[in-house]
């Protein structure tokens, strides 16, 4: 398993993105402490993960899916750091 960061700007006002969130939650593991960022634990490649969520976004949205390494830093709750340590 690896961890991928899914970061997005959903640009269609009033659009219901519940299906996107539910699709991301189907992953073997996920972390969602930041509004527009999910960390997804999966055996999928970045391309495979993007193809899985693509039907749930609009053409004017922007999305980045990128593999996470064990080199990271920031300011997050202790629970978030624990998730990262467990999954990376």
Image (tube, rainbow, N blue to C red):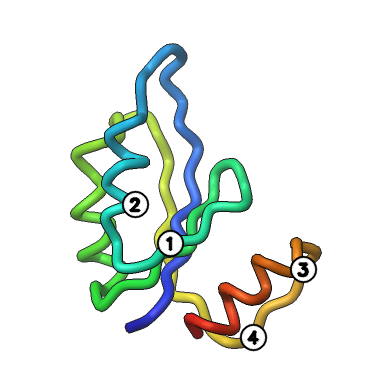
Judge depth for marks 1 and 3 and give the one in front.
1
Quick one: quadrant of the N terminus?
bottom left
**At 43% across and 75% down in the image, what residue appears?**
3
**Residue 30's disc number:** 1
N-terminal of the two: label 2 or label 3? 2
Judged by depth in the image, the label closer to the viewer, 4 or 1, is 1
Whole-angstrom CA distance, mark 1 to mark 2, is 7 Å
- For residue 35, above or below residue 60: below
Q: Horizontal and vertical percent for residue 2? A: 38, 81
In terms of secondary structure, where does tag 3 sit? Answer: loop
The residue pinned by badge 2 equals: 25
Q: Is residue 54 left or right of residue 1?
A: left
Say which of 59 and 22 sits in front. 22
N-terminal-most mark, 4 or 2: 2
Disc 2 secondary structure class:
helix
Q: Is residue 14 left or right of residue 44?
A: right
Cα gap from disc 4 to disc 3, whole angstroms: 11 Å
Q: Which residue is mark 3?
A: 74
Identify the image quadrant of residue 58.
Answer: top left
Mark 1 residue element: strand
* Residue on which disc 4 sits: 71
């Amino acid at each position: 398993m690896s961890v991928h960061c899914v970061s997005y700007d959903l640009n269609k006002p009033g659009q219901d993105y519940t299906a996107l969130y539910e699709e991301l939650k189907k992953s073997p593991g996920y972390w969602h402490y930041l509004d527009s960022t999910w960390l997804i634990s999966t055996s999928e490649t970045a391309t495979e993960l993007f193809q899985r969520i693509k039907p749930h976004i609009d053409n004017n949205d922007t999305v980045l899916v990128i593999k996470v390494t064990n080199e990271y830093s920031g300011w997050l709750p202790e629970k978030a750091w624990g998730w990262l340590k467990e999954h990376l």
